[in-house]
Amino acid sequence: MNHSPTQSILALSVGELLERLGSSAPAPGGGAAAALAGALGAALVQMTANLTLGRPRFAQVEAQAASIAERAGQLRARLASLGDADAAAYAEVAAAYGRPRADDAQKAARAAAIQTALGGAARVPIETAQVCAAVLHLAEEAAPLLNPSVISDVIVGAQLAAAGLEAAAINVEINLASLTDADLAASLAAELAAAQAGAAERRQRIVEVGRSRFPGR
Amino acid sequence: MNHSPTQSILALSVGELLERLGSSAPAPGGGAAAALAGALGAALVQMTANLTLGRPRFAQVEAQAASIAERAGQLRARLASLGDADAAAYAEVAAAYGRPRADDAQKAARAAAIQTALGGAARVPIETAQVCAAVLHLAEEAAPLLNPSVISDVIVGAQLAAAGLEAAAINVEINLASLTDADLAASLAAELAAAQAGAAERRQRIVEVGRSRFPGR
């Protein structure tokens, strides 16, 4: 299908993004917001690593901080692009619902196109959930290591990544509720469950480890 | 104190915001990210209300949807400005830490300035937590009423507002850990606890109510 190219949400100003999100335009919506929450989380882990690097008192963890900074930057970029991918997938769904349904053949073709588009649209939040889960793993690696003066930013990063994961899961679920292919729905649900496994406990551990390192404690 | 005016984060592109957040620049940081997560959440509640308004099949809830859209827009604007306020408050703290400490008089003046700045800096995330809590109240009002085709966006909005609240709480806590005025710390902690009260249960109720209204169920 051909859609007119839409502007990347990365090129919008933050003010414009909030304005468009709040408007009755169908995209960007909850899928893009979930990916952006995860991207904010990854950026905070990256920042804490960058505020650890090159400081003599953290020389012992220099190599680990460099590795965390690099991987956080990659996850951040991936989540940012998933925000755009969600809008594109949503446009496919909307286009399928907009197909003609004047006779039975058209109705059948439209129904099939809707199912294909919904299956594709469910893939974007599944990947968002997977990358948010990877941010949580990275934050768990970062919490005991990085500069304690800014360790609250690792905790906040983990909280935002966990919210991005849970939000992506809701977006998968609402798509699956309309999918008629039970096998595809079950396989997508299993992929989602794998991304969610252990995330809440990991988030809690990061909060506890990070908090125990607050300055003044 | 005079600080050179800093650019509003609302004027940055989303891509620039993520880049600055991930960099070693101390601001924007976790406080701005928490407020932005809440603003994304408020925008999604506003969008769902706007996708309910003016549709004949939702005529019965038209007045309520209009009221939700308006209040969500106000909370969104307040959270967006708190993102900037956090960067300004952080600059005060950094300036206080940067004061001279050549003799005892300077040391005492610097310590007092740090305490004043920390007390002020703790106020921004407390207000962020309060406004995120207000977004959760609004999402609870919205979940049983608004257009079920896009009700997942109310759930995602609640998840992001809850994450913004929890993230703001961590930012308050790390500031309180360095405050020496025990009375001020206790009073700020009590304000924070009031904003947090019932939020997790409210978030869970919104997920359940919204999910029960998914199309296809």
Image (spheres, coloured by chain):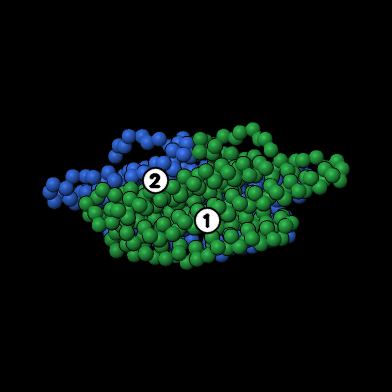
Chain colours: A green, B blue
To which chain does the residue with label 2 belong?
B
What numbered label is drawn on residue B85?
A: none
Q: Which residue is mark 2?
A: B22
Residue A195, horizontal then vertical, whole percent: 54, 60
Most foreground residue, B97 or B67: B97
| Residue depicted at 66% across the width and 35% down the height | A3
To which chain does the residue with label 1 belong?
A
The count of marks equals 2
Residue B22, horizontal then vertical, whole percent: 39, 45
| Residue depicted at 37% across the width and 64% down the height | A209
What numbered label is drawn on residue A130?
A: 1
| Residue depicted at 43% across the width and 54% down the height | A157
| Residue depicted at 44% across the width and 59% down the height | A137
Local SS, label 2: helix
Most foreground residue, B5 or B108: B5
Q: Residues within 10 Å of mark 1 (few under 14, many from 20)?
A: many
